[in-house]
Image (cartoon, rainbow, N blue to C red):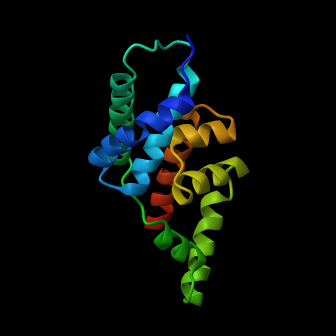
Amino acid sequence: MAINVEEYYKKYGPMVLRRCRTLLSNEDKALDAMQDVFIKLIKKDSDLMDNSPSSLLYRIATNTCLNILRSEKRRPHINNDEILLNVAGKDDHEKRVLTNHFLNRLFEEEKESTRVIAVMHYVDGLTLEETASQIGLSVSGVRKRLRNLRKKGLILKEV
């Protein structure tokens, strides 16, 4: 029997949101996680049974939040405003010139898609999975390009 996701959202949404708030301690992240829970429910609704929906949603919410926390631990939060200001060199002409020179050297022999991957992941904050699906590469391909770009950046920074 197919699950009525809209009915579940109305009935169990507050419970899922409370669970996400408790685990993530951040309102915006909790709201995003709650949406992810119901998206997962939509994707798997044909495989699920209508026995104990609150337990199912509680478990999905917990796993979703734990995955978010693990992801954040692996990839610490980077202040996007600081990155954008550094890249743009907002008020400092010399800094802007040096930053542009560094970025030109960093990306001069890279594929255009590597630059897009870097912006999506580091500036827009997309996960490796989201970036990979947007670009049309595997997660390992995106990870490899970012790793190589980081190594190249560290070498250029030392020079």
Question: Which residue in the rendered view is the most extreme toward the right?
Answer: 112
* Residue 150 % position (x, y): 48, 53
**From where the camera sits, is residue 1 visible?**
yes
The structure residue drawn at horizontal position 58% and vertical position 35%, both measured from the top left corner, is 141
The structure residue drawn at horizontal position 43% and vertical position 66%, both measured from the top left corner, is 79
* Residue 75 % position (x, y): 39, 49
The structure residue drawn at horizontal position 52% and vertical position 41%, both measured from the top left corner, is 128
The structure residue drawn at horizontal position 50% and vertical position 59%, both measured from the top left corner, is 153
Q: Note whether 117 is above or below 9 in the view shown.
A: below
33 or 68, nearer to the observer: 33
* Residue 42 % position (x, y): 57, 27
Q: In which quarter of the image is the N terminus?
A: top right
* Residue 74 % position (x, y): 35, 44
**From where the camera sits, is residue 140 visible?**
no
Number of numbered labels in the structure image: 0
Relative placement, left or right, of 92 versus 57 is right
Q: Note whether 140 is above or below 116 in the view shown.
A: above
